[in-house]
């Protein structure tokens, strides 16, 4: 029997993708680890590797096809000793073509009652349900028993699409909360009106669609509160110069942003009531600070993560950030390098933006917006002087973080930057 190669879930939130380019053709022999295709997800274009050996018997989905559901058969692989031409003509009833019903149709939603199918989602060596974190959260909110859900992801992994169409089962549903609001379909966008003005139409990429959806969700469902402080940068800039002189022999050059990442992480550790995530009737309290850093890339924005930034040396943060940013612009980040994070930092100072209010990146509960440092009158030790001053604005999810707690975080952030030796402790 031919091996069905299916559209993979390259991230926990991926439901569909664009098969951008085939790097193999029918008749080619592939081995495990060979790159077979480039697939555009909701965040980046990623390479898809072969996991089996054999000959490409048939390509089911042409390159350039958009909206290919996770789990859809995209090609057939003939195994060792198998006739590739015969494999190509073999029926594949268990593998839907792109035009077939989407992955949701495979869930128990079509049945009159949830049918237990633990083998679908159990780990081979135990009875643990294999499901993405997002699928687990949606299942908890909807009261869906994951033991009765068939997973369409790799190795039977349950993904978001599988849970959304499932009916409530044995698991008790939590009380209704604001966190369930994203499940509702957003209002339809208004029809385009060109009014006869010359223009061209550009189709949205998967990334741009995701940005539009997530930011709409954020502003519609998260009650933002904004807190702004002005910060004297003179001591930080002086320390940065001294550190760069000392690190020059190691080829390390710190940016102001590297120091701000460290400052935000240490602030979250110092004020743990802000290092949280709202989850309906529960609150996740994180034990470390993973900072998502906004990076502009062609066609959109991505947020690579400096994990446990509070405990890392600023030189390590600088080296790691340069590597992540470079690979982000090339579309070569792995999902775990940009999905997650406990809070975000967005710096638009390099564009001369004085101050702005950033939109929270769900499911996080806060984001720090950094403006440009500029010469301003500022009171230093009781005397009015000219200093390098920047404005920083924290956006907080008011469901999870009270204004006073957010203010405490902003106070600690300001103190760390104005007395930056604390960043090295």
Image (spheres, helix red, strand yellow):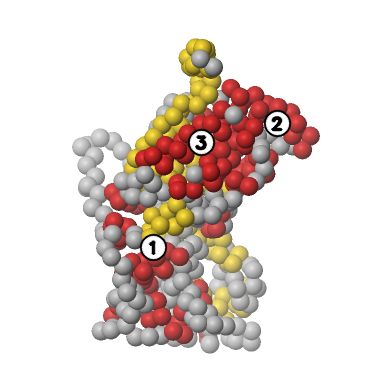
How many neighbours does mark 3 have within 10 angstroms: few (below 14), some (14-19), or many (20 or more)?
Answer: some
Position above or below: 349 against 156:
above
Q: Which residue is mark 3?
A: 412
Q: Quadrant of residue 235?
A: top right
Q: Position of residue 94 (x, y in %)?
A: 42, 83
Asked if the residues shown at circle 3 and circle 2 are in contact, with their CB atoms under 8 angstroms apart, the answer is no
Residue 207 visible? The answer is: no
Q: Closer to the camera, 59 or 233?
A: 233
How many neighbours does mark 1 have within 10 angstroms: few (below 14), some (14-19), or many (20 or more)?
Answer: some
Element under disc 1? strand
Element under disc 3? helix
Residue 423 visible? The answer is: yes
* Sequence-wise first label, 3 or 2: 2
Element under disc 2? helix
In the shown orientation, is residue 109 left or right of residue 333? left
Which residue does the image show at 54% across and 54% down from the upper left?
Answer: 287
Which residue does the image show at 26% across and 54% down from the upper left?
Answer: 186
Q: Which residue is mark 1?
A: 67
Which residue does the image show at 53% across and 87% down from the upper left?
Answer: 1
Position above or below: 291 against 257:
below
Kindly report the distance in space between the C-alpha atoms of the residues bearing marks 3 and 2.
22 Å
Q: Quadrant of the C terminus?
A: top right
Q: Which mark is residue 243?
A: 2
Which residue does the image show at 77% across and 38% down from the upper left?
Answer: 250
Q: Quadrant of residue 99?
A: bottom left
Q: Closer to the camera, 340 or 72?
A: 340
* Sequence-wise first label, 2 or 1: 1
Q: Closer to the camera, 315 or 421?
A: 421
Asked if the residues shown at circle 1 and circle 3 are in contact, with their CB atoms under 8 angstroms apart, the answer is no
Q: Position of residue 193 (x, y in %)?
A: 22, 42
Q: Position of residue 325 (x, y in %)?
A: 58, 44
Q: Residue furthest top?
A: 384
């Amino acid at each position: 029997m031919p091996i069905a190669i299916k559209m993979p879930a390259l991230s926990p939130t991926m439901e569909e993708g664009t098969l951008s380019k085939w790097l193999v053709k029918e008749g080619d022999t592939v081995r495990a680890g060979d790159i077979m295709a480039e697939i555009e997800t909701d965040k980046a274009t990623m390479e898809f590797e072969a996991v089996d050996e054999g000959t490409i018997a048939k390509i089911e989905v042409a390159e350039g096809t958009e909206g290919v559901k996770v789990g859809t058969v995209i090609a057939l692989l003939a195994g060792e000793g198998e006739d590739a031409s015969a494999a190509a003509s073999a029926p594949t009833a268990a593998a839907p073509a792109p035009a077939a019903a989407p992955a949701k149709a495979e869930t128990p939603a079509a049945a009159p009652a949830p049918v237990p199918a633990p083998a679908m989602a159990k780990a081979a060596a135990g009875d643990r349900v294999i499901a993405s974190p997002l699928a687990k959260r949606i299942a908890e909110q909807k009261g869906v028993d994951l033991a009765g859900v068939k997973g369409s992801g790799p190795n039977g992994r349950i993904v978001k699409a599988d849970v959304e169409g499932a009916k409530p089962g044995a698991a008790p549903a939590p009380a209704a909360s604001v966190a369930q609001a994203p499940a509702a379909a957003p209002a339809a966008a208004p029809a385009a009106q060109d009014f006869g003005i010359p223009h061209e139409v550009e189709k949205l990429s998967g990334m741009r669609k995701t940005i539009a959806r997530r930011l709409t969700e954020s502003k519609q469902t998260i009650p933002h509160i904004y807190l702004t402080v002005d910060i004297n940068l003179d001591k930080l800039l002086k320390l940065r110069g001294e550190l760069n002189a000392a690190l020059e022999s190691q080829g390390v050059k710190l940016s102001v942003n590297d120091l701000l990442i460290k400052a935000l992480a240490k602030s979250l550790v110092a004020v743990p009531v802000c290092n949280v995530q709202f989850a309906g009737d529960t609150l996740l309290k994180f034990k470390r600070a993973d900072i998502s850093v906004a990076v502009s890339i062609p066609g959109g924005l991505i947020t690579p993560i400096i994990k446990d930034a509070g405990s890392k040396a600023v030189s390590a943060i600088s080296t790691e950030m340069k590597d992540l940013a470079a690979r982000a612009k090339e579309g070569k980040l792995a999902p775990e390098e940009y999905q997650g994070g406990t809070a975000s930092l967005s710096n638009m100072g390099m564009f001369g933006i004085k101050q702005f209010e950033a939109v929270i990146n769900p499911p996080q509960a806060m984001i720090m917006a950094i403006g440009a440092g500029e010469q301003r009158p500022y009171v230093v030790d009781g005397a009015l002087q000219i200093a390098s001053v920047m404005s920083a604005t924290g956006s907080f999810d008011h469901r999870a973080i009270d204004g006073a707690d957010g203010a405490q975080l902003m106070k600690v952030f300001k103190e760390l930057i104005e007395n930056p030796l604390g960043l090295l402790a």
